[in-house]
Each structure stands twice: as structure tokens, then as C-alpha cells.
Image (cartoon, rainbow, N blue to C red):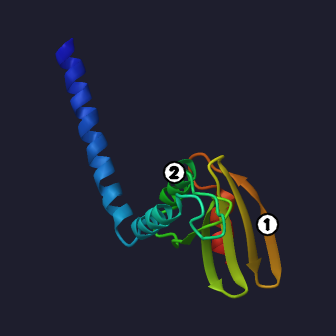
């Protein structure tokens, strides 16, 4: 009985590795968001201490960093990567910008909420989305609408 279980675990481990390896290679390629995740790490390194801006900014917490990481990592392959920054309230900002009048800014916090505001030509959109696993479909549509 153990050999059957061991064999099934070996097969499942092999399949798991066979599926995950190409996905990891894609995520690290130009199609993935490797550069954006590197930028996020740099922002977090610079902004994880209080007063990082010299004007009493709150630090970016590890929870906020992890929420932003999960969001970026869950964006579809080949999807435009955002520019990344930090806000004085300790949130991380992701921004997609096509032009001065076509831009979307998303504030990521540790509590799983995404607050967004965007200019779409003559129109504006703003609101709040929840994010716990995959990138919200509404966020994907907003970026595509730019």
C-alpha cells in the first residue's frame, strides 16, 4: 500500500513541477511581472521605516508589501505592468498611465482593499475593490479601458 501511495505522490510531485516550471519561466520573462516585483521590493526597502519621506510618512508594512506583491503577481501574463510608489499613509500605489488624461492609480493596503481613481479621457472613475487572491476582473477592465 505504501508503494502505491509513494508512487502517486511521486507522480503528483512530478506533474506539479512540470506545470509550475514553465509558469515560473513565463512570469520571469518580459511577459511576466518580474521587473514590477523588483520595483516593488525597492520601494518597500526605501519606505518601510517611519518618516521615509522626511514629512512624517507612515512606513509601508510587510502586510501591505505582501498584498501588493500578490496583486502584481496575479496580473495576467502579458498584461501591462504598473509603475510603483508609496503613499504617506503607508499604502503602495500602482499606476498605469497612457497619457495625461488616461491614467489609473490604485492604492493597495494590507487590509485587502484596493482604492482606485482614474481619468479616462473626459470621464472619471473611482471606487474600492477587494483583493484576496486573483486580480479583480474590474481592475483588469479598468486598465484595458485606458
Residue located 61% across and 73% down the image: 95
Dot in front, 2 or 1? 2
Q: Which callout, 2 or 1, points at the residue further toward the start of the chain?
A: 2
Task: Find residue 2 and report its image quarter.
Answer: top left
Q: Which residue lies furthest to the bottom in this view?
A: 100
Q: Is mark 1 on a helix, strand or loop?
A: strand
Q: How far apart are marks 2 and 1 (CA)?
A: 23 Å
Q: In which quarter of the image is the C terminus?
A: bottom right
Disc sitting over residue 50 in the figure: none
Instruction: Using the image as rendered, state which of residue 51 and residue 103 is in the foreground.
Output: 51
Position of 63 with respect to 7 (left or right) is right
Is residue 32 in view from this perspective?
no
Position of 62 with respect to 57 (left or right) is left
Q: Where does the image place residue 132, in percent across and percent down from the top left?
A: 60, 46
Q: What element carries label 2?
A: helix
> Around disc 2, counting alpha carbons within 10 Å, would you say few (fewer than 14), some (14 to 19), or many (20 or more)?
some
Residue located 44% across and 62% down the image: 41
Residue indicated by mark 1: 126
Disc sitting over residue 66 in the figure: 2
Instruction: Using the image as rendered, state which of residue 109 and residue 95 is in the foreground.
Output: 109
Amino acid at each position: 500500500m505504501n508503494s502505491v501511495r509513494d508512487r502517486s505522490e511521486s507522480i503528483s510531485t512530478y506533474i506539479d513541477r512540470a506545470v509550475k516550471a514553465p509558469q515560473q519561466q513565463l512570469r520571469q520573462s518580459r511577459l511576466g511581472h518580474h521587473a514590477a516585483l523588483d520595483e516593488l521590493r525597492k520601494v518597500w526597502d526605501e519606505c518601510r521605516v517611519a518618516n521615509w519621506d522626511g514629512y512624517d510618512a507612515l512606513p509601508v508594512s510587510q502586510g501591505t508589501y505582501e498584498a501588493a506583491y500578490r496583486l502584481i503577481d496575479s496580473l495576467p501574463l502579458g498584461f501591462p505592468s504598473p509603475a510603483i510608489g508609496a503613499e504617506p499613509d503607508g499604502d503602495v500605489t500602482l499606476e498605469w498611465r497612457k497619457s495625461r488624461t488616461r491614467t489609473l492609480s490604485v492604492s493597495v493596503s494590507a487590509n485587502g482593499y484596493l482604492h482606485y481613481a482614474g481619468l479616462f479621457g473626459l470621464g472619471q472613475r473611482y471606487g474600492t475593490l477587494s483583493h484576496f487572491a486573483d486580480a479583480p476582473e474590474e481592475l483588469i477592465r479598468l486598465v484595458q479601458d485606458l
